[in-house]
Image: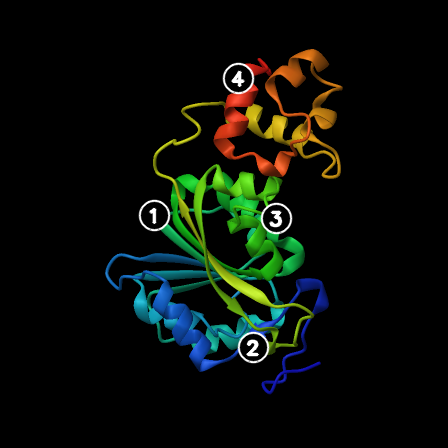
C-alpha cells in the first residue's frame, strides 16, 4: 500500500502514519513546549506529521528515522530549519544525549515495551514522554484497575496520564485497533527508589505476576515459606490488586533478597 506521496509502507517497521489537522492541533494543545527552552527527541517522524509542529514550538528537535526511503523526503522538507537534526538510525541502537528532554513518538505496537524500557533506563536525561500507543497498552500503563507488571514498571519511575483516545481511522494504513496518546512525567525525586532497590523490586514483581490466573500466594509459594506467606497475604488476593507501596511493604515483610 502507498500514500499519496508514493511511500510504500513497510510492515517490518510497523508504519501507520497520521495525517489529520484537527488531531495535530489536539496533540499540540496537550504538549508543553517552549520555543526558547524545549529540547525534543522524536522517535519515528514518518513523513513529518508532528515534526513541523515540534520544530516551530521548540528550541531544538532531534528525530530518529530508520526507514531509508523517508530520509530524502524529511531532509528536503525541513532543510531550512536550523533547529532540526535528523538521525538516520535505529533508535533502539542510538545513544541518547542531552538533558531535560521531551520525548515524543508515534511508536509501532510491536516495539512499545523495548522503547519504554530504553527511555526509562535513560530517565536521567528526560523530563516528559509523550507516546501514541495501542489503546489497550495505554490503559494498562495508566489504569488503577487493570494493573499489570507493565503498569508497575512504568509508574515506579514516572507519573502516567491518559490524555485521549485516537480512532484507528486517523491512521494510514488503518490498524485493527484504536490508539491513545499518553504522557509520562519522569519523577525527579526518588519516590520509590528511596524505599527499595529497584532491581529487587522488579525481580519480585516477575514472581508475583508469573501466572495471572493464580493467586499471589500460589505464585510465590515456591520461593517462600507457605505459612509466612499466609500470615502476610490474603489467600484470595491477586498481584494486580496490589499497589506499588503494597508490594514494597510485602517485599520487606517477606525479607526478600
Q: Nearer the viewer, residue 24 or 245?
A: 245
Query: Where residue 100 is drawn, which disc sits there?
Result: 1
Q: Quadrant of residue 232?
A: top right
Q: Secondary structure at mark 4?
A: helix
Q: In the image, is residue 196 above or below residue 210? A: above
Gap between marks 4 and 1, in whole Å? 34 Å
The image position of residue 195, as x and y in percent, is 43, 23
Residue at which label 3 appears: 113
Residue at (46% x, 38% y) in the render: 157
Q: How many marks?
A: 4
Which is more foreground, mark 4 or mark 1?
Answer: 4
Gap between marks 1 and 3, in whole Å? 22 Å
The image position of residue 167, as x and y in percent, is 57, 73
Mark 1 residue crowding within 10 angstroms, few (<14) / some (14–19) / many (20+) = some
The image position of residue 77, as x and y in percent, is 45, 78
Q: Is residue 157 at least partly visible in the picture?
A: yes
Q: Nearer the viewer, residue 102 or 215?
A: 215
Residue at which label 2 appears: 170
Which is more foreground, mark 2 or mark 1?
Answer: 2
Amino acid at each position: 500500500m502507498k500514500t499519496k506521496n508514493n511511500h510504500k509502507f513497510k510492515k517490518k517497521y510497523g508504519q501507520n502514519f497520521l495525517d489529520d489537522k484537527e488531531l495535530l492541533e489536539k496533540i499540540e494543545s496537550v504538549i508543553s513546549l517552549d520555543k526558547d527552552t524545549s529540547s525534543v527527541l522524536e522517535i519515528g517522524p514518518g513523513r513529518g506529521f508532528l515534526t513541523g509542529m515540534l520544530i516551530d514550538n521548540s528550541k531544538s528537535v532531534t528525530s530518529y528515522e530508520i526507514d531509508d526511503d523517508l530520509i530524502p523526503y524529511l531532509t528536503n522538507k525541513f532543510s531550512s530549519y536550523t533547529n532540526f537534526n535528523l538521525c538516520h538510525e535505529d533508535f533502539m541502537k542510538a545513544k541518547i544525549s542531552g538533558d531535560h528532554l521531551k520525548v515524543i513518538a508515534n511508536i509501532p505496537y510491536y516495539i512499545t515495551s523495548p522503547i519504554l524500557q530504553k527511555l526509562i533506563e535513560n530517565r536521567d536525561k528526560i523530563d516528559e514522554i509523550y507516546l501514541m500507543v495501542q489503546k489497550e497498552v495505554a490503559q494498562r500503563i495508566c489504569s488503577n484497575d487493570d494493573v499489570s507488571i507493565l503498569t508497575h514498571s512504568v509508574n515506579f519511575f514516572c507519573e502516567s496520564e491518559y490524555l485521549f483516545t485516537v480512532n484507528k481511522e486517523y491512521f494510514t494504513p488503518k490498524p485493527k485497533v484504536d490508539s491513545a496518546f499518553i504522557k509520562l512525567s519522569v519523577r525527579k525525586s526518588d519516590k520509590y527508589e528511596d524505599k527499595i532497590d529497584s532491581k529487587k523490586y522488579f525481580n519480585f514483581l516477575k514472581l508475583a505476576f508469573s501466572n495471572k490466573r493464580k493467586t499471589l500466594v500460589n505464585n510465590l509459594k515456591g520461593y517462600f515459606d507457605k505459612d509466612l506467606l499466609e500470615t502476610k497475604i490474603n489467600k484470595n488476593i491477586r498481584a494486580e490488586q496490589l499497589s506499588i507501596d503494597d508490594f514494597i511493604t510485602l517485599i520487606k515483610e517477606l525479607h526478600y533478597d
